[in-house]
Image (cartoon, helix red, strand yellow):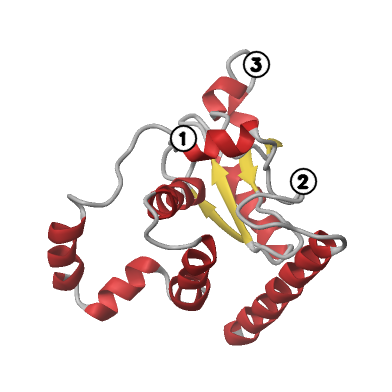
Amino acid sequence: IITSNTSALPLTDLTRNAKHPERFFITHFFAPPQLIPLVEIIKLENYREDLLQEIVSFLKVCGKSPIVLKKEVPGFIANRIQMAILRECFWLYENDIATAEDIDTVMKDSLGFRYVFLGPLEGQDIAGLNTPYYVSQTLFPVISDTKEPPKFLKKMIDENKLGIRTNEGFYSYGPGEVDRKLKERDEHFLDVYLLKQKTKR
């Protein structure tokens, strides 16, 4: 078994000159990998089923939640969902609808809070599928569908505002704040991980 942790490179490209492409898979972990359960698995059309099952079994033994894509698609699943959310967040920020802090609060205290234990499609089943159908008629025409990265993001990059690696991005980070932020993040992730494990029993 040969796997890659890439989050974007197509498996078809990685195996272009491989003598045994059926042995190649992508196992895409998420940072921090010791805490985030999900692993996306991507396979080729001519994959070996026995090797795939070996990967899935091994990941489950490691306490992971492996999912297998039915077919390869750019960005896989999580990154496509994440970028769709980010596109709208960038639009709201760029058009001065809300501050970065307010946008983050909306995610952390509503959508993210809900999605920890209830996936978006499960949630629509509970709401009733007629609800998202009619809401989508109103919102799909007006939400962002831009095909280009936002100009303000390029400006921030040009100004060396890259986030925690330069101590400034959407937020500013003073001495010791980056380490505190990462420690706080990991502690929250661990709390959620342990709670999810408890609910599985």
List x then y, in percent, for residue 137. Answer: 13, 58
Q: Quadrant of residue 106?
A: bottom left
Q: How far apart in space, not on screen, are marks 2 and 1 (Cα)?
A: 21 Å
Instruction: Say whether residue 72 is left or right of residue 121.
Output: right
Q: How many marks on residues?
A: 3
Residue at (62, 13) in percent of width and height:
17
Using the image, tell me which numbered label, if any, was put on residue 151.
1
Type of residue at label 1?
Answer: Lys
Q: Nearer the viewer, residue 41 or 49?
A: 41
Element type at mark 1:
helix
117 over 201 or under it: above or below: above
How crowded pointer 1 is (Cα within 10 Å; few <14, some 14-19, many 20+) is rated as few
List x then y, in percent, for residue 140. Answer: 20, 53
Residue at (46, 47) in percent of width and height:
83
- Write down the residue under mark 2: 165
Can the viewer see residue 84?
Answer: yes
Type of residue at label 2?
Answer: Arg
Q: Nearer the viewer, residue 90 or 86?
A: 90
Element type at mark 3:
loop
Q: How far apart in space, not on screen, are marks 3 and 1 (Cα)?
A: 44 Å
Instruction: Say whether residue 90 is left or right of residue 154.
Output: left
Q: Nearer the viewer, residue 127 or 50?
A: 127
Residue at (53, 39) in percent of width and height:
153
